[in-house]
Image: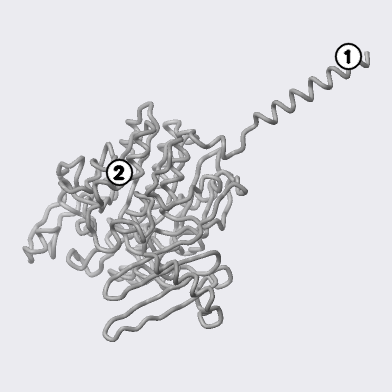
Amino acid sequence: MNNVINKFLVAAAILVAISCKEEKSPYEKAVASKPNILYILADDLGYGDLGCYGQDVIKTPNIDKLASEGLLFRQHYAGATVCAPSRNSLITGQHMGHTTIKSMEKPIKKEDITVAEVLKTAGYSTGVIGKWGLGAVGTTGYANDQGFDYSFGYYDQIRAHNYYPDYLWENGEKYPLKNKVIYVTDSTNYAVGIGNAAVEKVEYSNDVFTEKALDFLDKKGNDPFFLYLAYTIPHANNESFLINEHGMEVPDLGIYANEDWPEAKKAGAAMISRLDSYIGVLMDKLKEKGLEKETLVIFTSDNGPHQEGGWNLDFFDSNGSLQGMKRDLYEGGIRIPFIARWPEIITPGKTDNVATFWDFMPTACDLAGVEVPRSSDGISYLPTLVGDFDRQPKHDFLYWEFDTSISRRAARKGDYKLVTITKKNPDTTSVELFNISNDISEEYNLAEENPKMVEELMNVIDQF
């Protein structure tokens, strides 16, 4: 009898050992699992504009719910501090030292490898809806020539400043909207948009983006999809397109109509809450279609908050406790809200893992089970998404640049971040070193007391 028991115990032990050996880690389960990817990008939404990031006036219940069901990143960085280079970083997986578009808008190169092209090799159907801004029809940056099966929205940045255009673009063809110009006072402006004109406002572009996104989800076939949904909310109108006393354009003021605030502040808050309502509709559609558990949803912003069109970032603390805003390389210009939800795969919570826009390319490659292009500067954050933190590699450094009449450079290594600002006439350069871990607001310049770290980070900047 003892012999039988011993044999049974040995057999059981072998089975347990085999079972343990075959048990995969969360990361191993997620790699090459080919989930759908819905990547939602806001435009100029600040780190402090959402309830889940500390906003206590503007209401964002749907995005807050997304955060409660997913992973909220507290140290996620945009590719740049303005839209075109930041979006290019996201799409190509390159930081500002290598990417084609560094400041002003121009098309990405034909030879640039995009995340859409890579995902297509893994059998994904791909779409971009909203603001593309990386090349118009007939250029090397045209979205349908850069890996997207479907494109809808604004191809260029200038028209994207107008929330009531007379047309958008769908797969390279003009898609007319019902908005009508009643009179035009400046024919030059009219050539690029509405100009200083009275307009019959019927179709709000971001409402149309949501309708097209719902259509895209309704038409989903058997292949996994990658939908890049790039809203233009809460970007302000460019001055050339002002059709009222401020540049925050929204169909109605919603729950803020009776607030005792300046009109532009009410409109800006309404824009953010309207964006939030889109998220609720999209999540309902995923659930209705039975796609919830097989879809990774990411929500983020292209850079920090603006201060244009009557909006003031201090009014609602749009940058939270961060210094700076759009066009700065302080944290307020580049640290952005970032939420990832994937039911039963991502454990809800928060993370201080440092991640960036150029990390999306390798993360998508991980998910699709394809090789990361050699052109990418990124590191997959998939281990962080699934809670496999021991497997998560870290960046040696992060790098940003932005040039106008002033040259701005920034590099981060570990907890330290260097910001240099060079002005002309006369040439002057300021050098600031911050310890981000205990000085998130970048108030204390440590450059003089830590010259070794300044030199180390200057060496990073000098590479590019």
Tell me the quarter of the picture where residue 123 sits.
top left
Looking at this view, is 149 or 398 the one in front? 398
- Amino acid, disc 2: Val
Looking at this view, is 100 or 51 the one in front? 100
Q: Earlier in the sequence, mark 2 or mark 1?
A: 1
Looking at the rendered image, the quarter that the N terminus falls into is top right
Q: Is residue 103 left or right of residue 7?
A: left
The image shows residue 306, relative to residue 271, as above or below, that is below
Indicate the position of residue 141 as horizontal and vertical percent values: 23, 48
Seen at 19% across and 45% down, the residue is 169
Indicate the position of residue 153 as horizontal and vertical percent values: 24, 47
Indicate the position of residue 235 as horizontal and vertical percent values: 31, 61
The image shows residue 210, relative to residue 79, as above or below, that is above
The label number, if any, that marks residue 128 in the structure image: 2
- Amino acid, disc 1: Val
Seen at 34% across and 69% down, the residue is 327
Looking at this view, is 18 or 334 the one in front? 18
The image shows residue 27, relative to residue 425, as above or below, that is above
Q: Is residue 15 left or right of residue 124?
A: right
Q: Label 2, secondary structure: give it.
A: strand
Q: Label 1, secondary structure: give it.
A: helix
The image shows residue 133, relative to residue 27, as above or below, that is below
Seen at 28% across and 81% down, the residue is 424
Tell me the quarter of the picture where residue 284 sits.
top left
Looking at this view, is 362 or 161 the one in front? 362
How many circles with numbers are drawn on the protein? 2
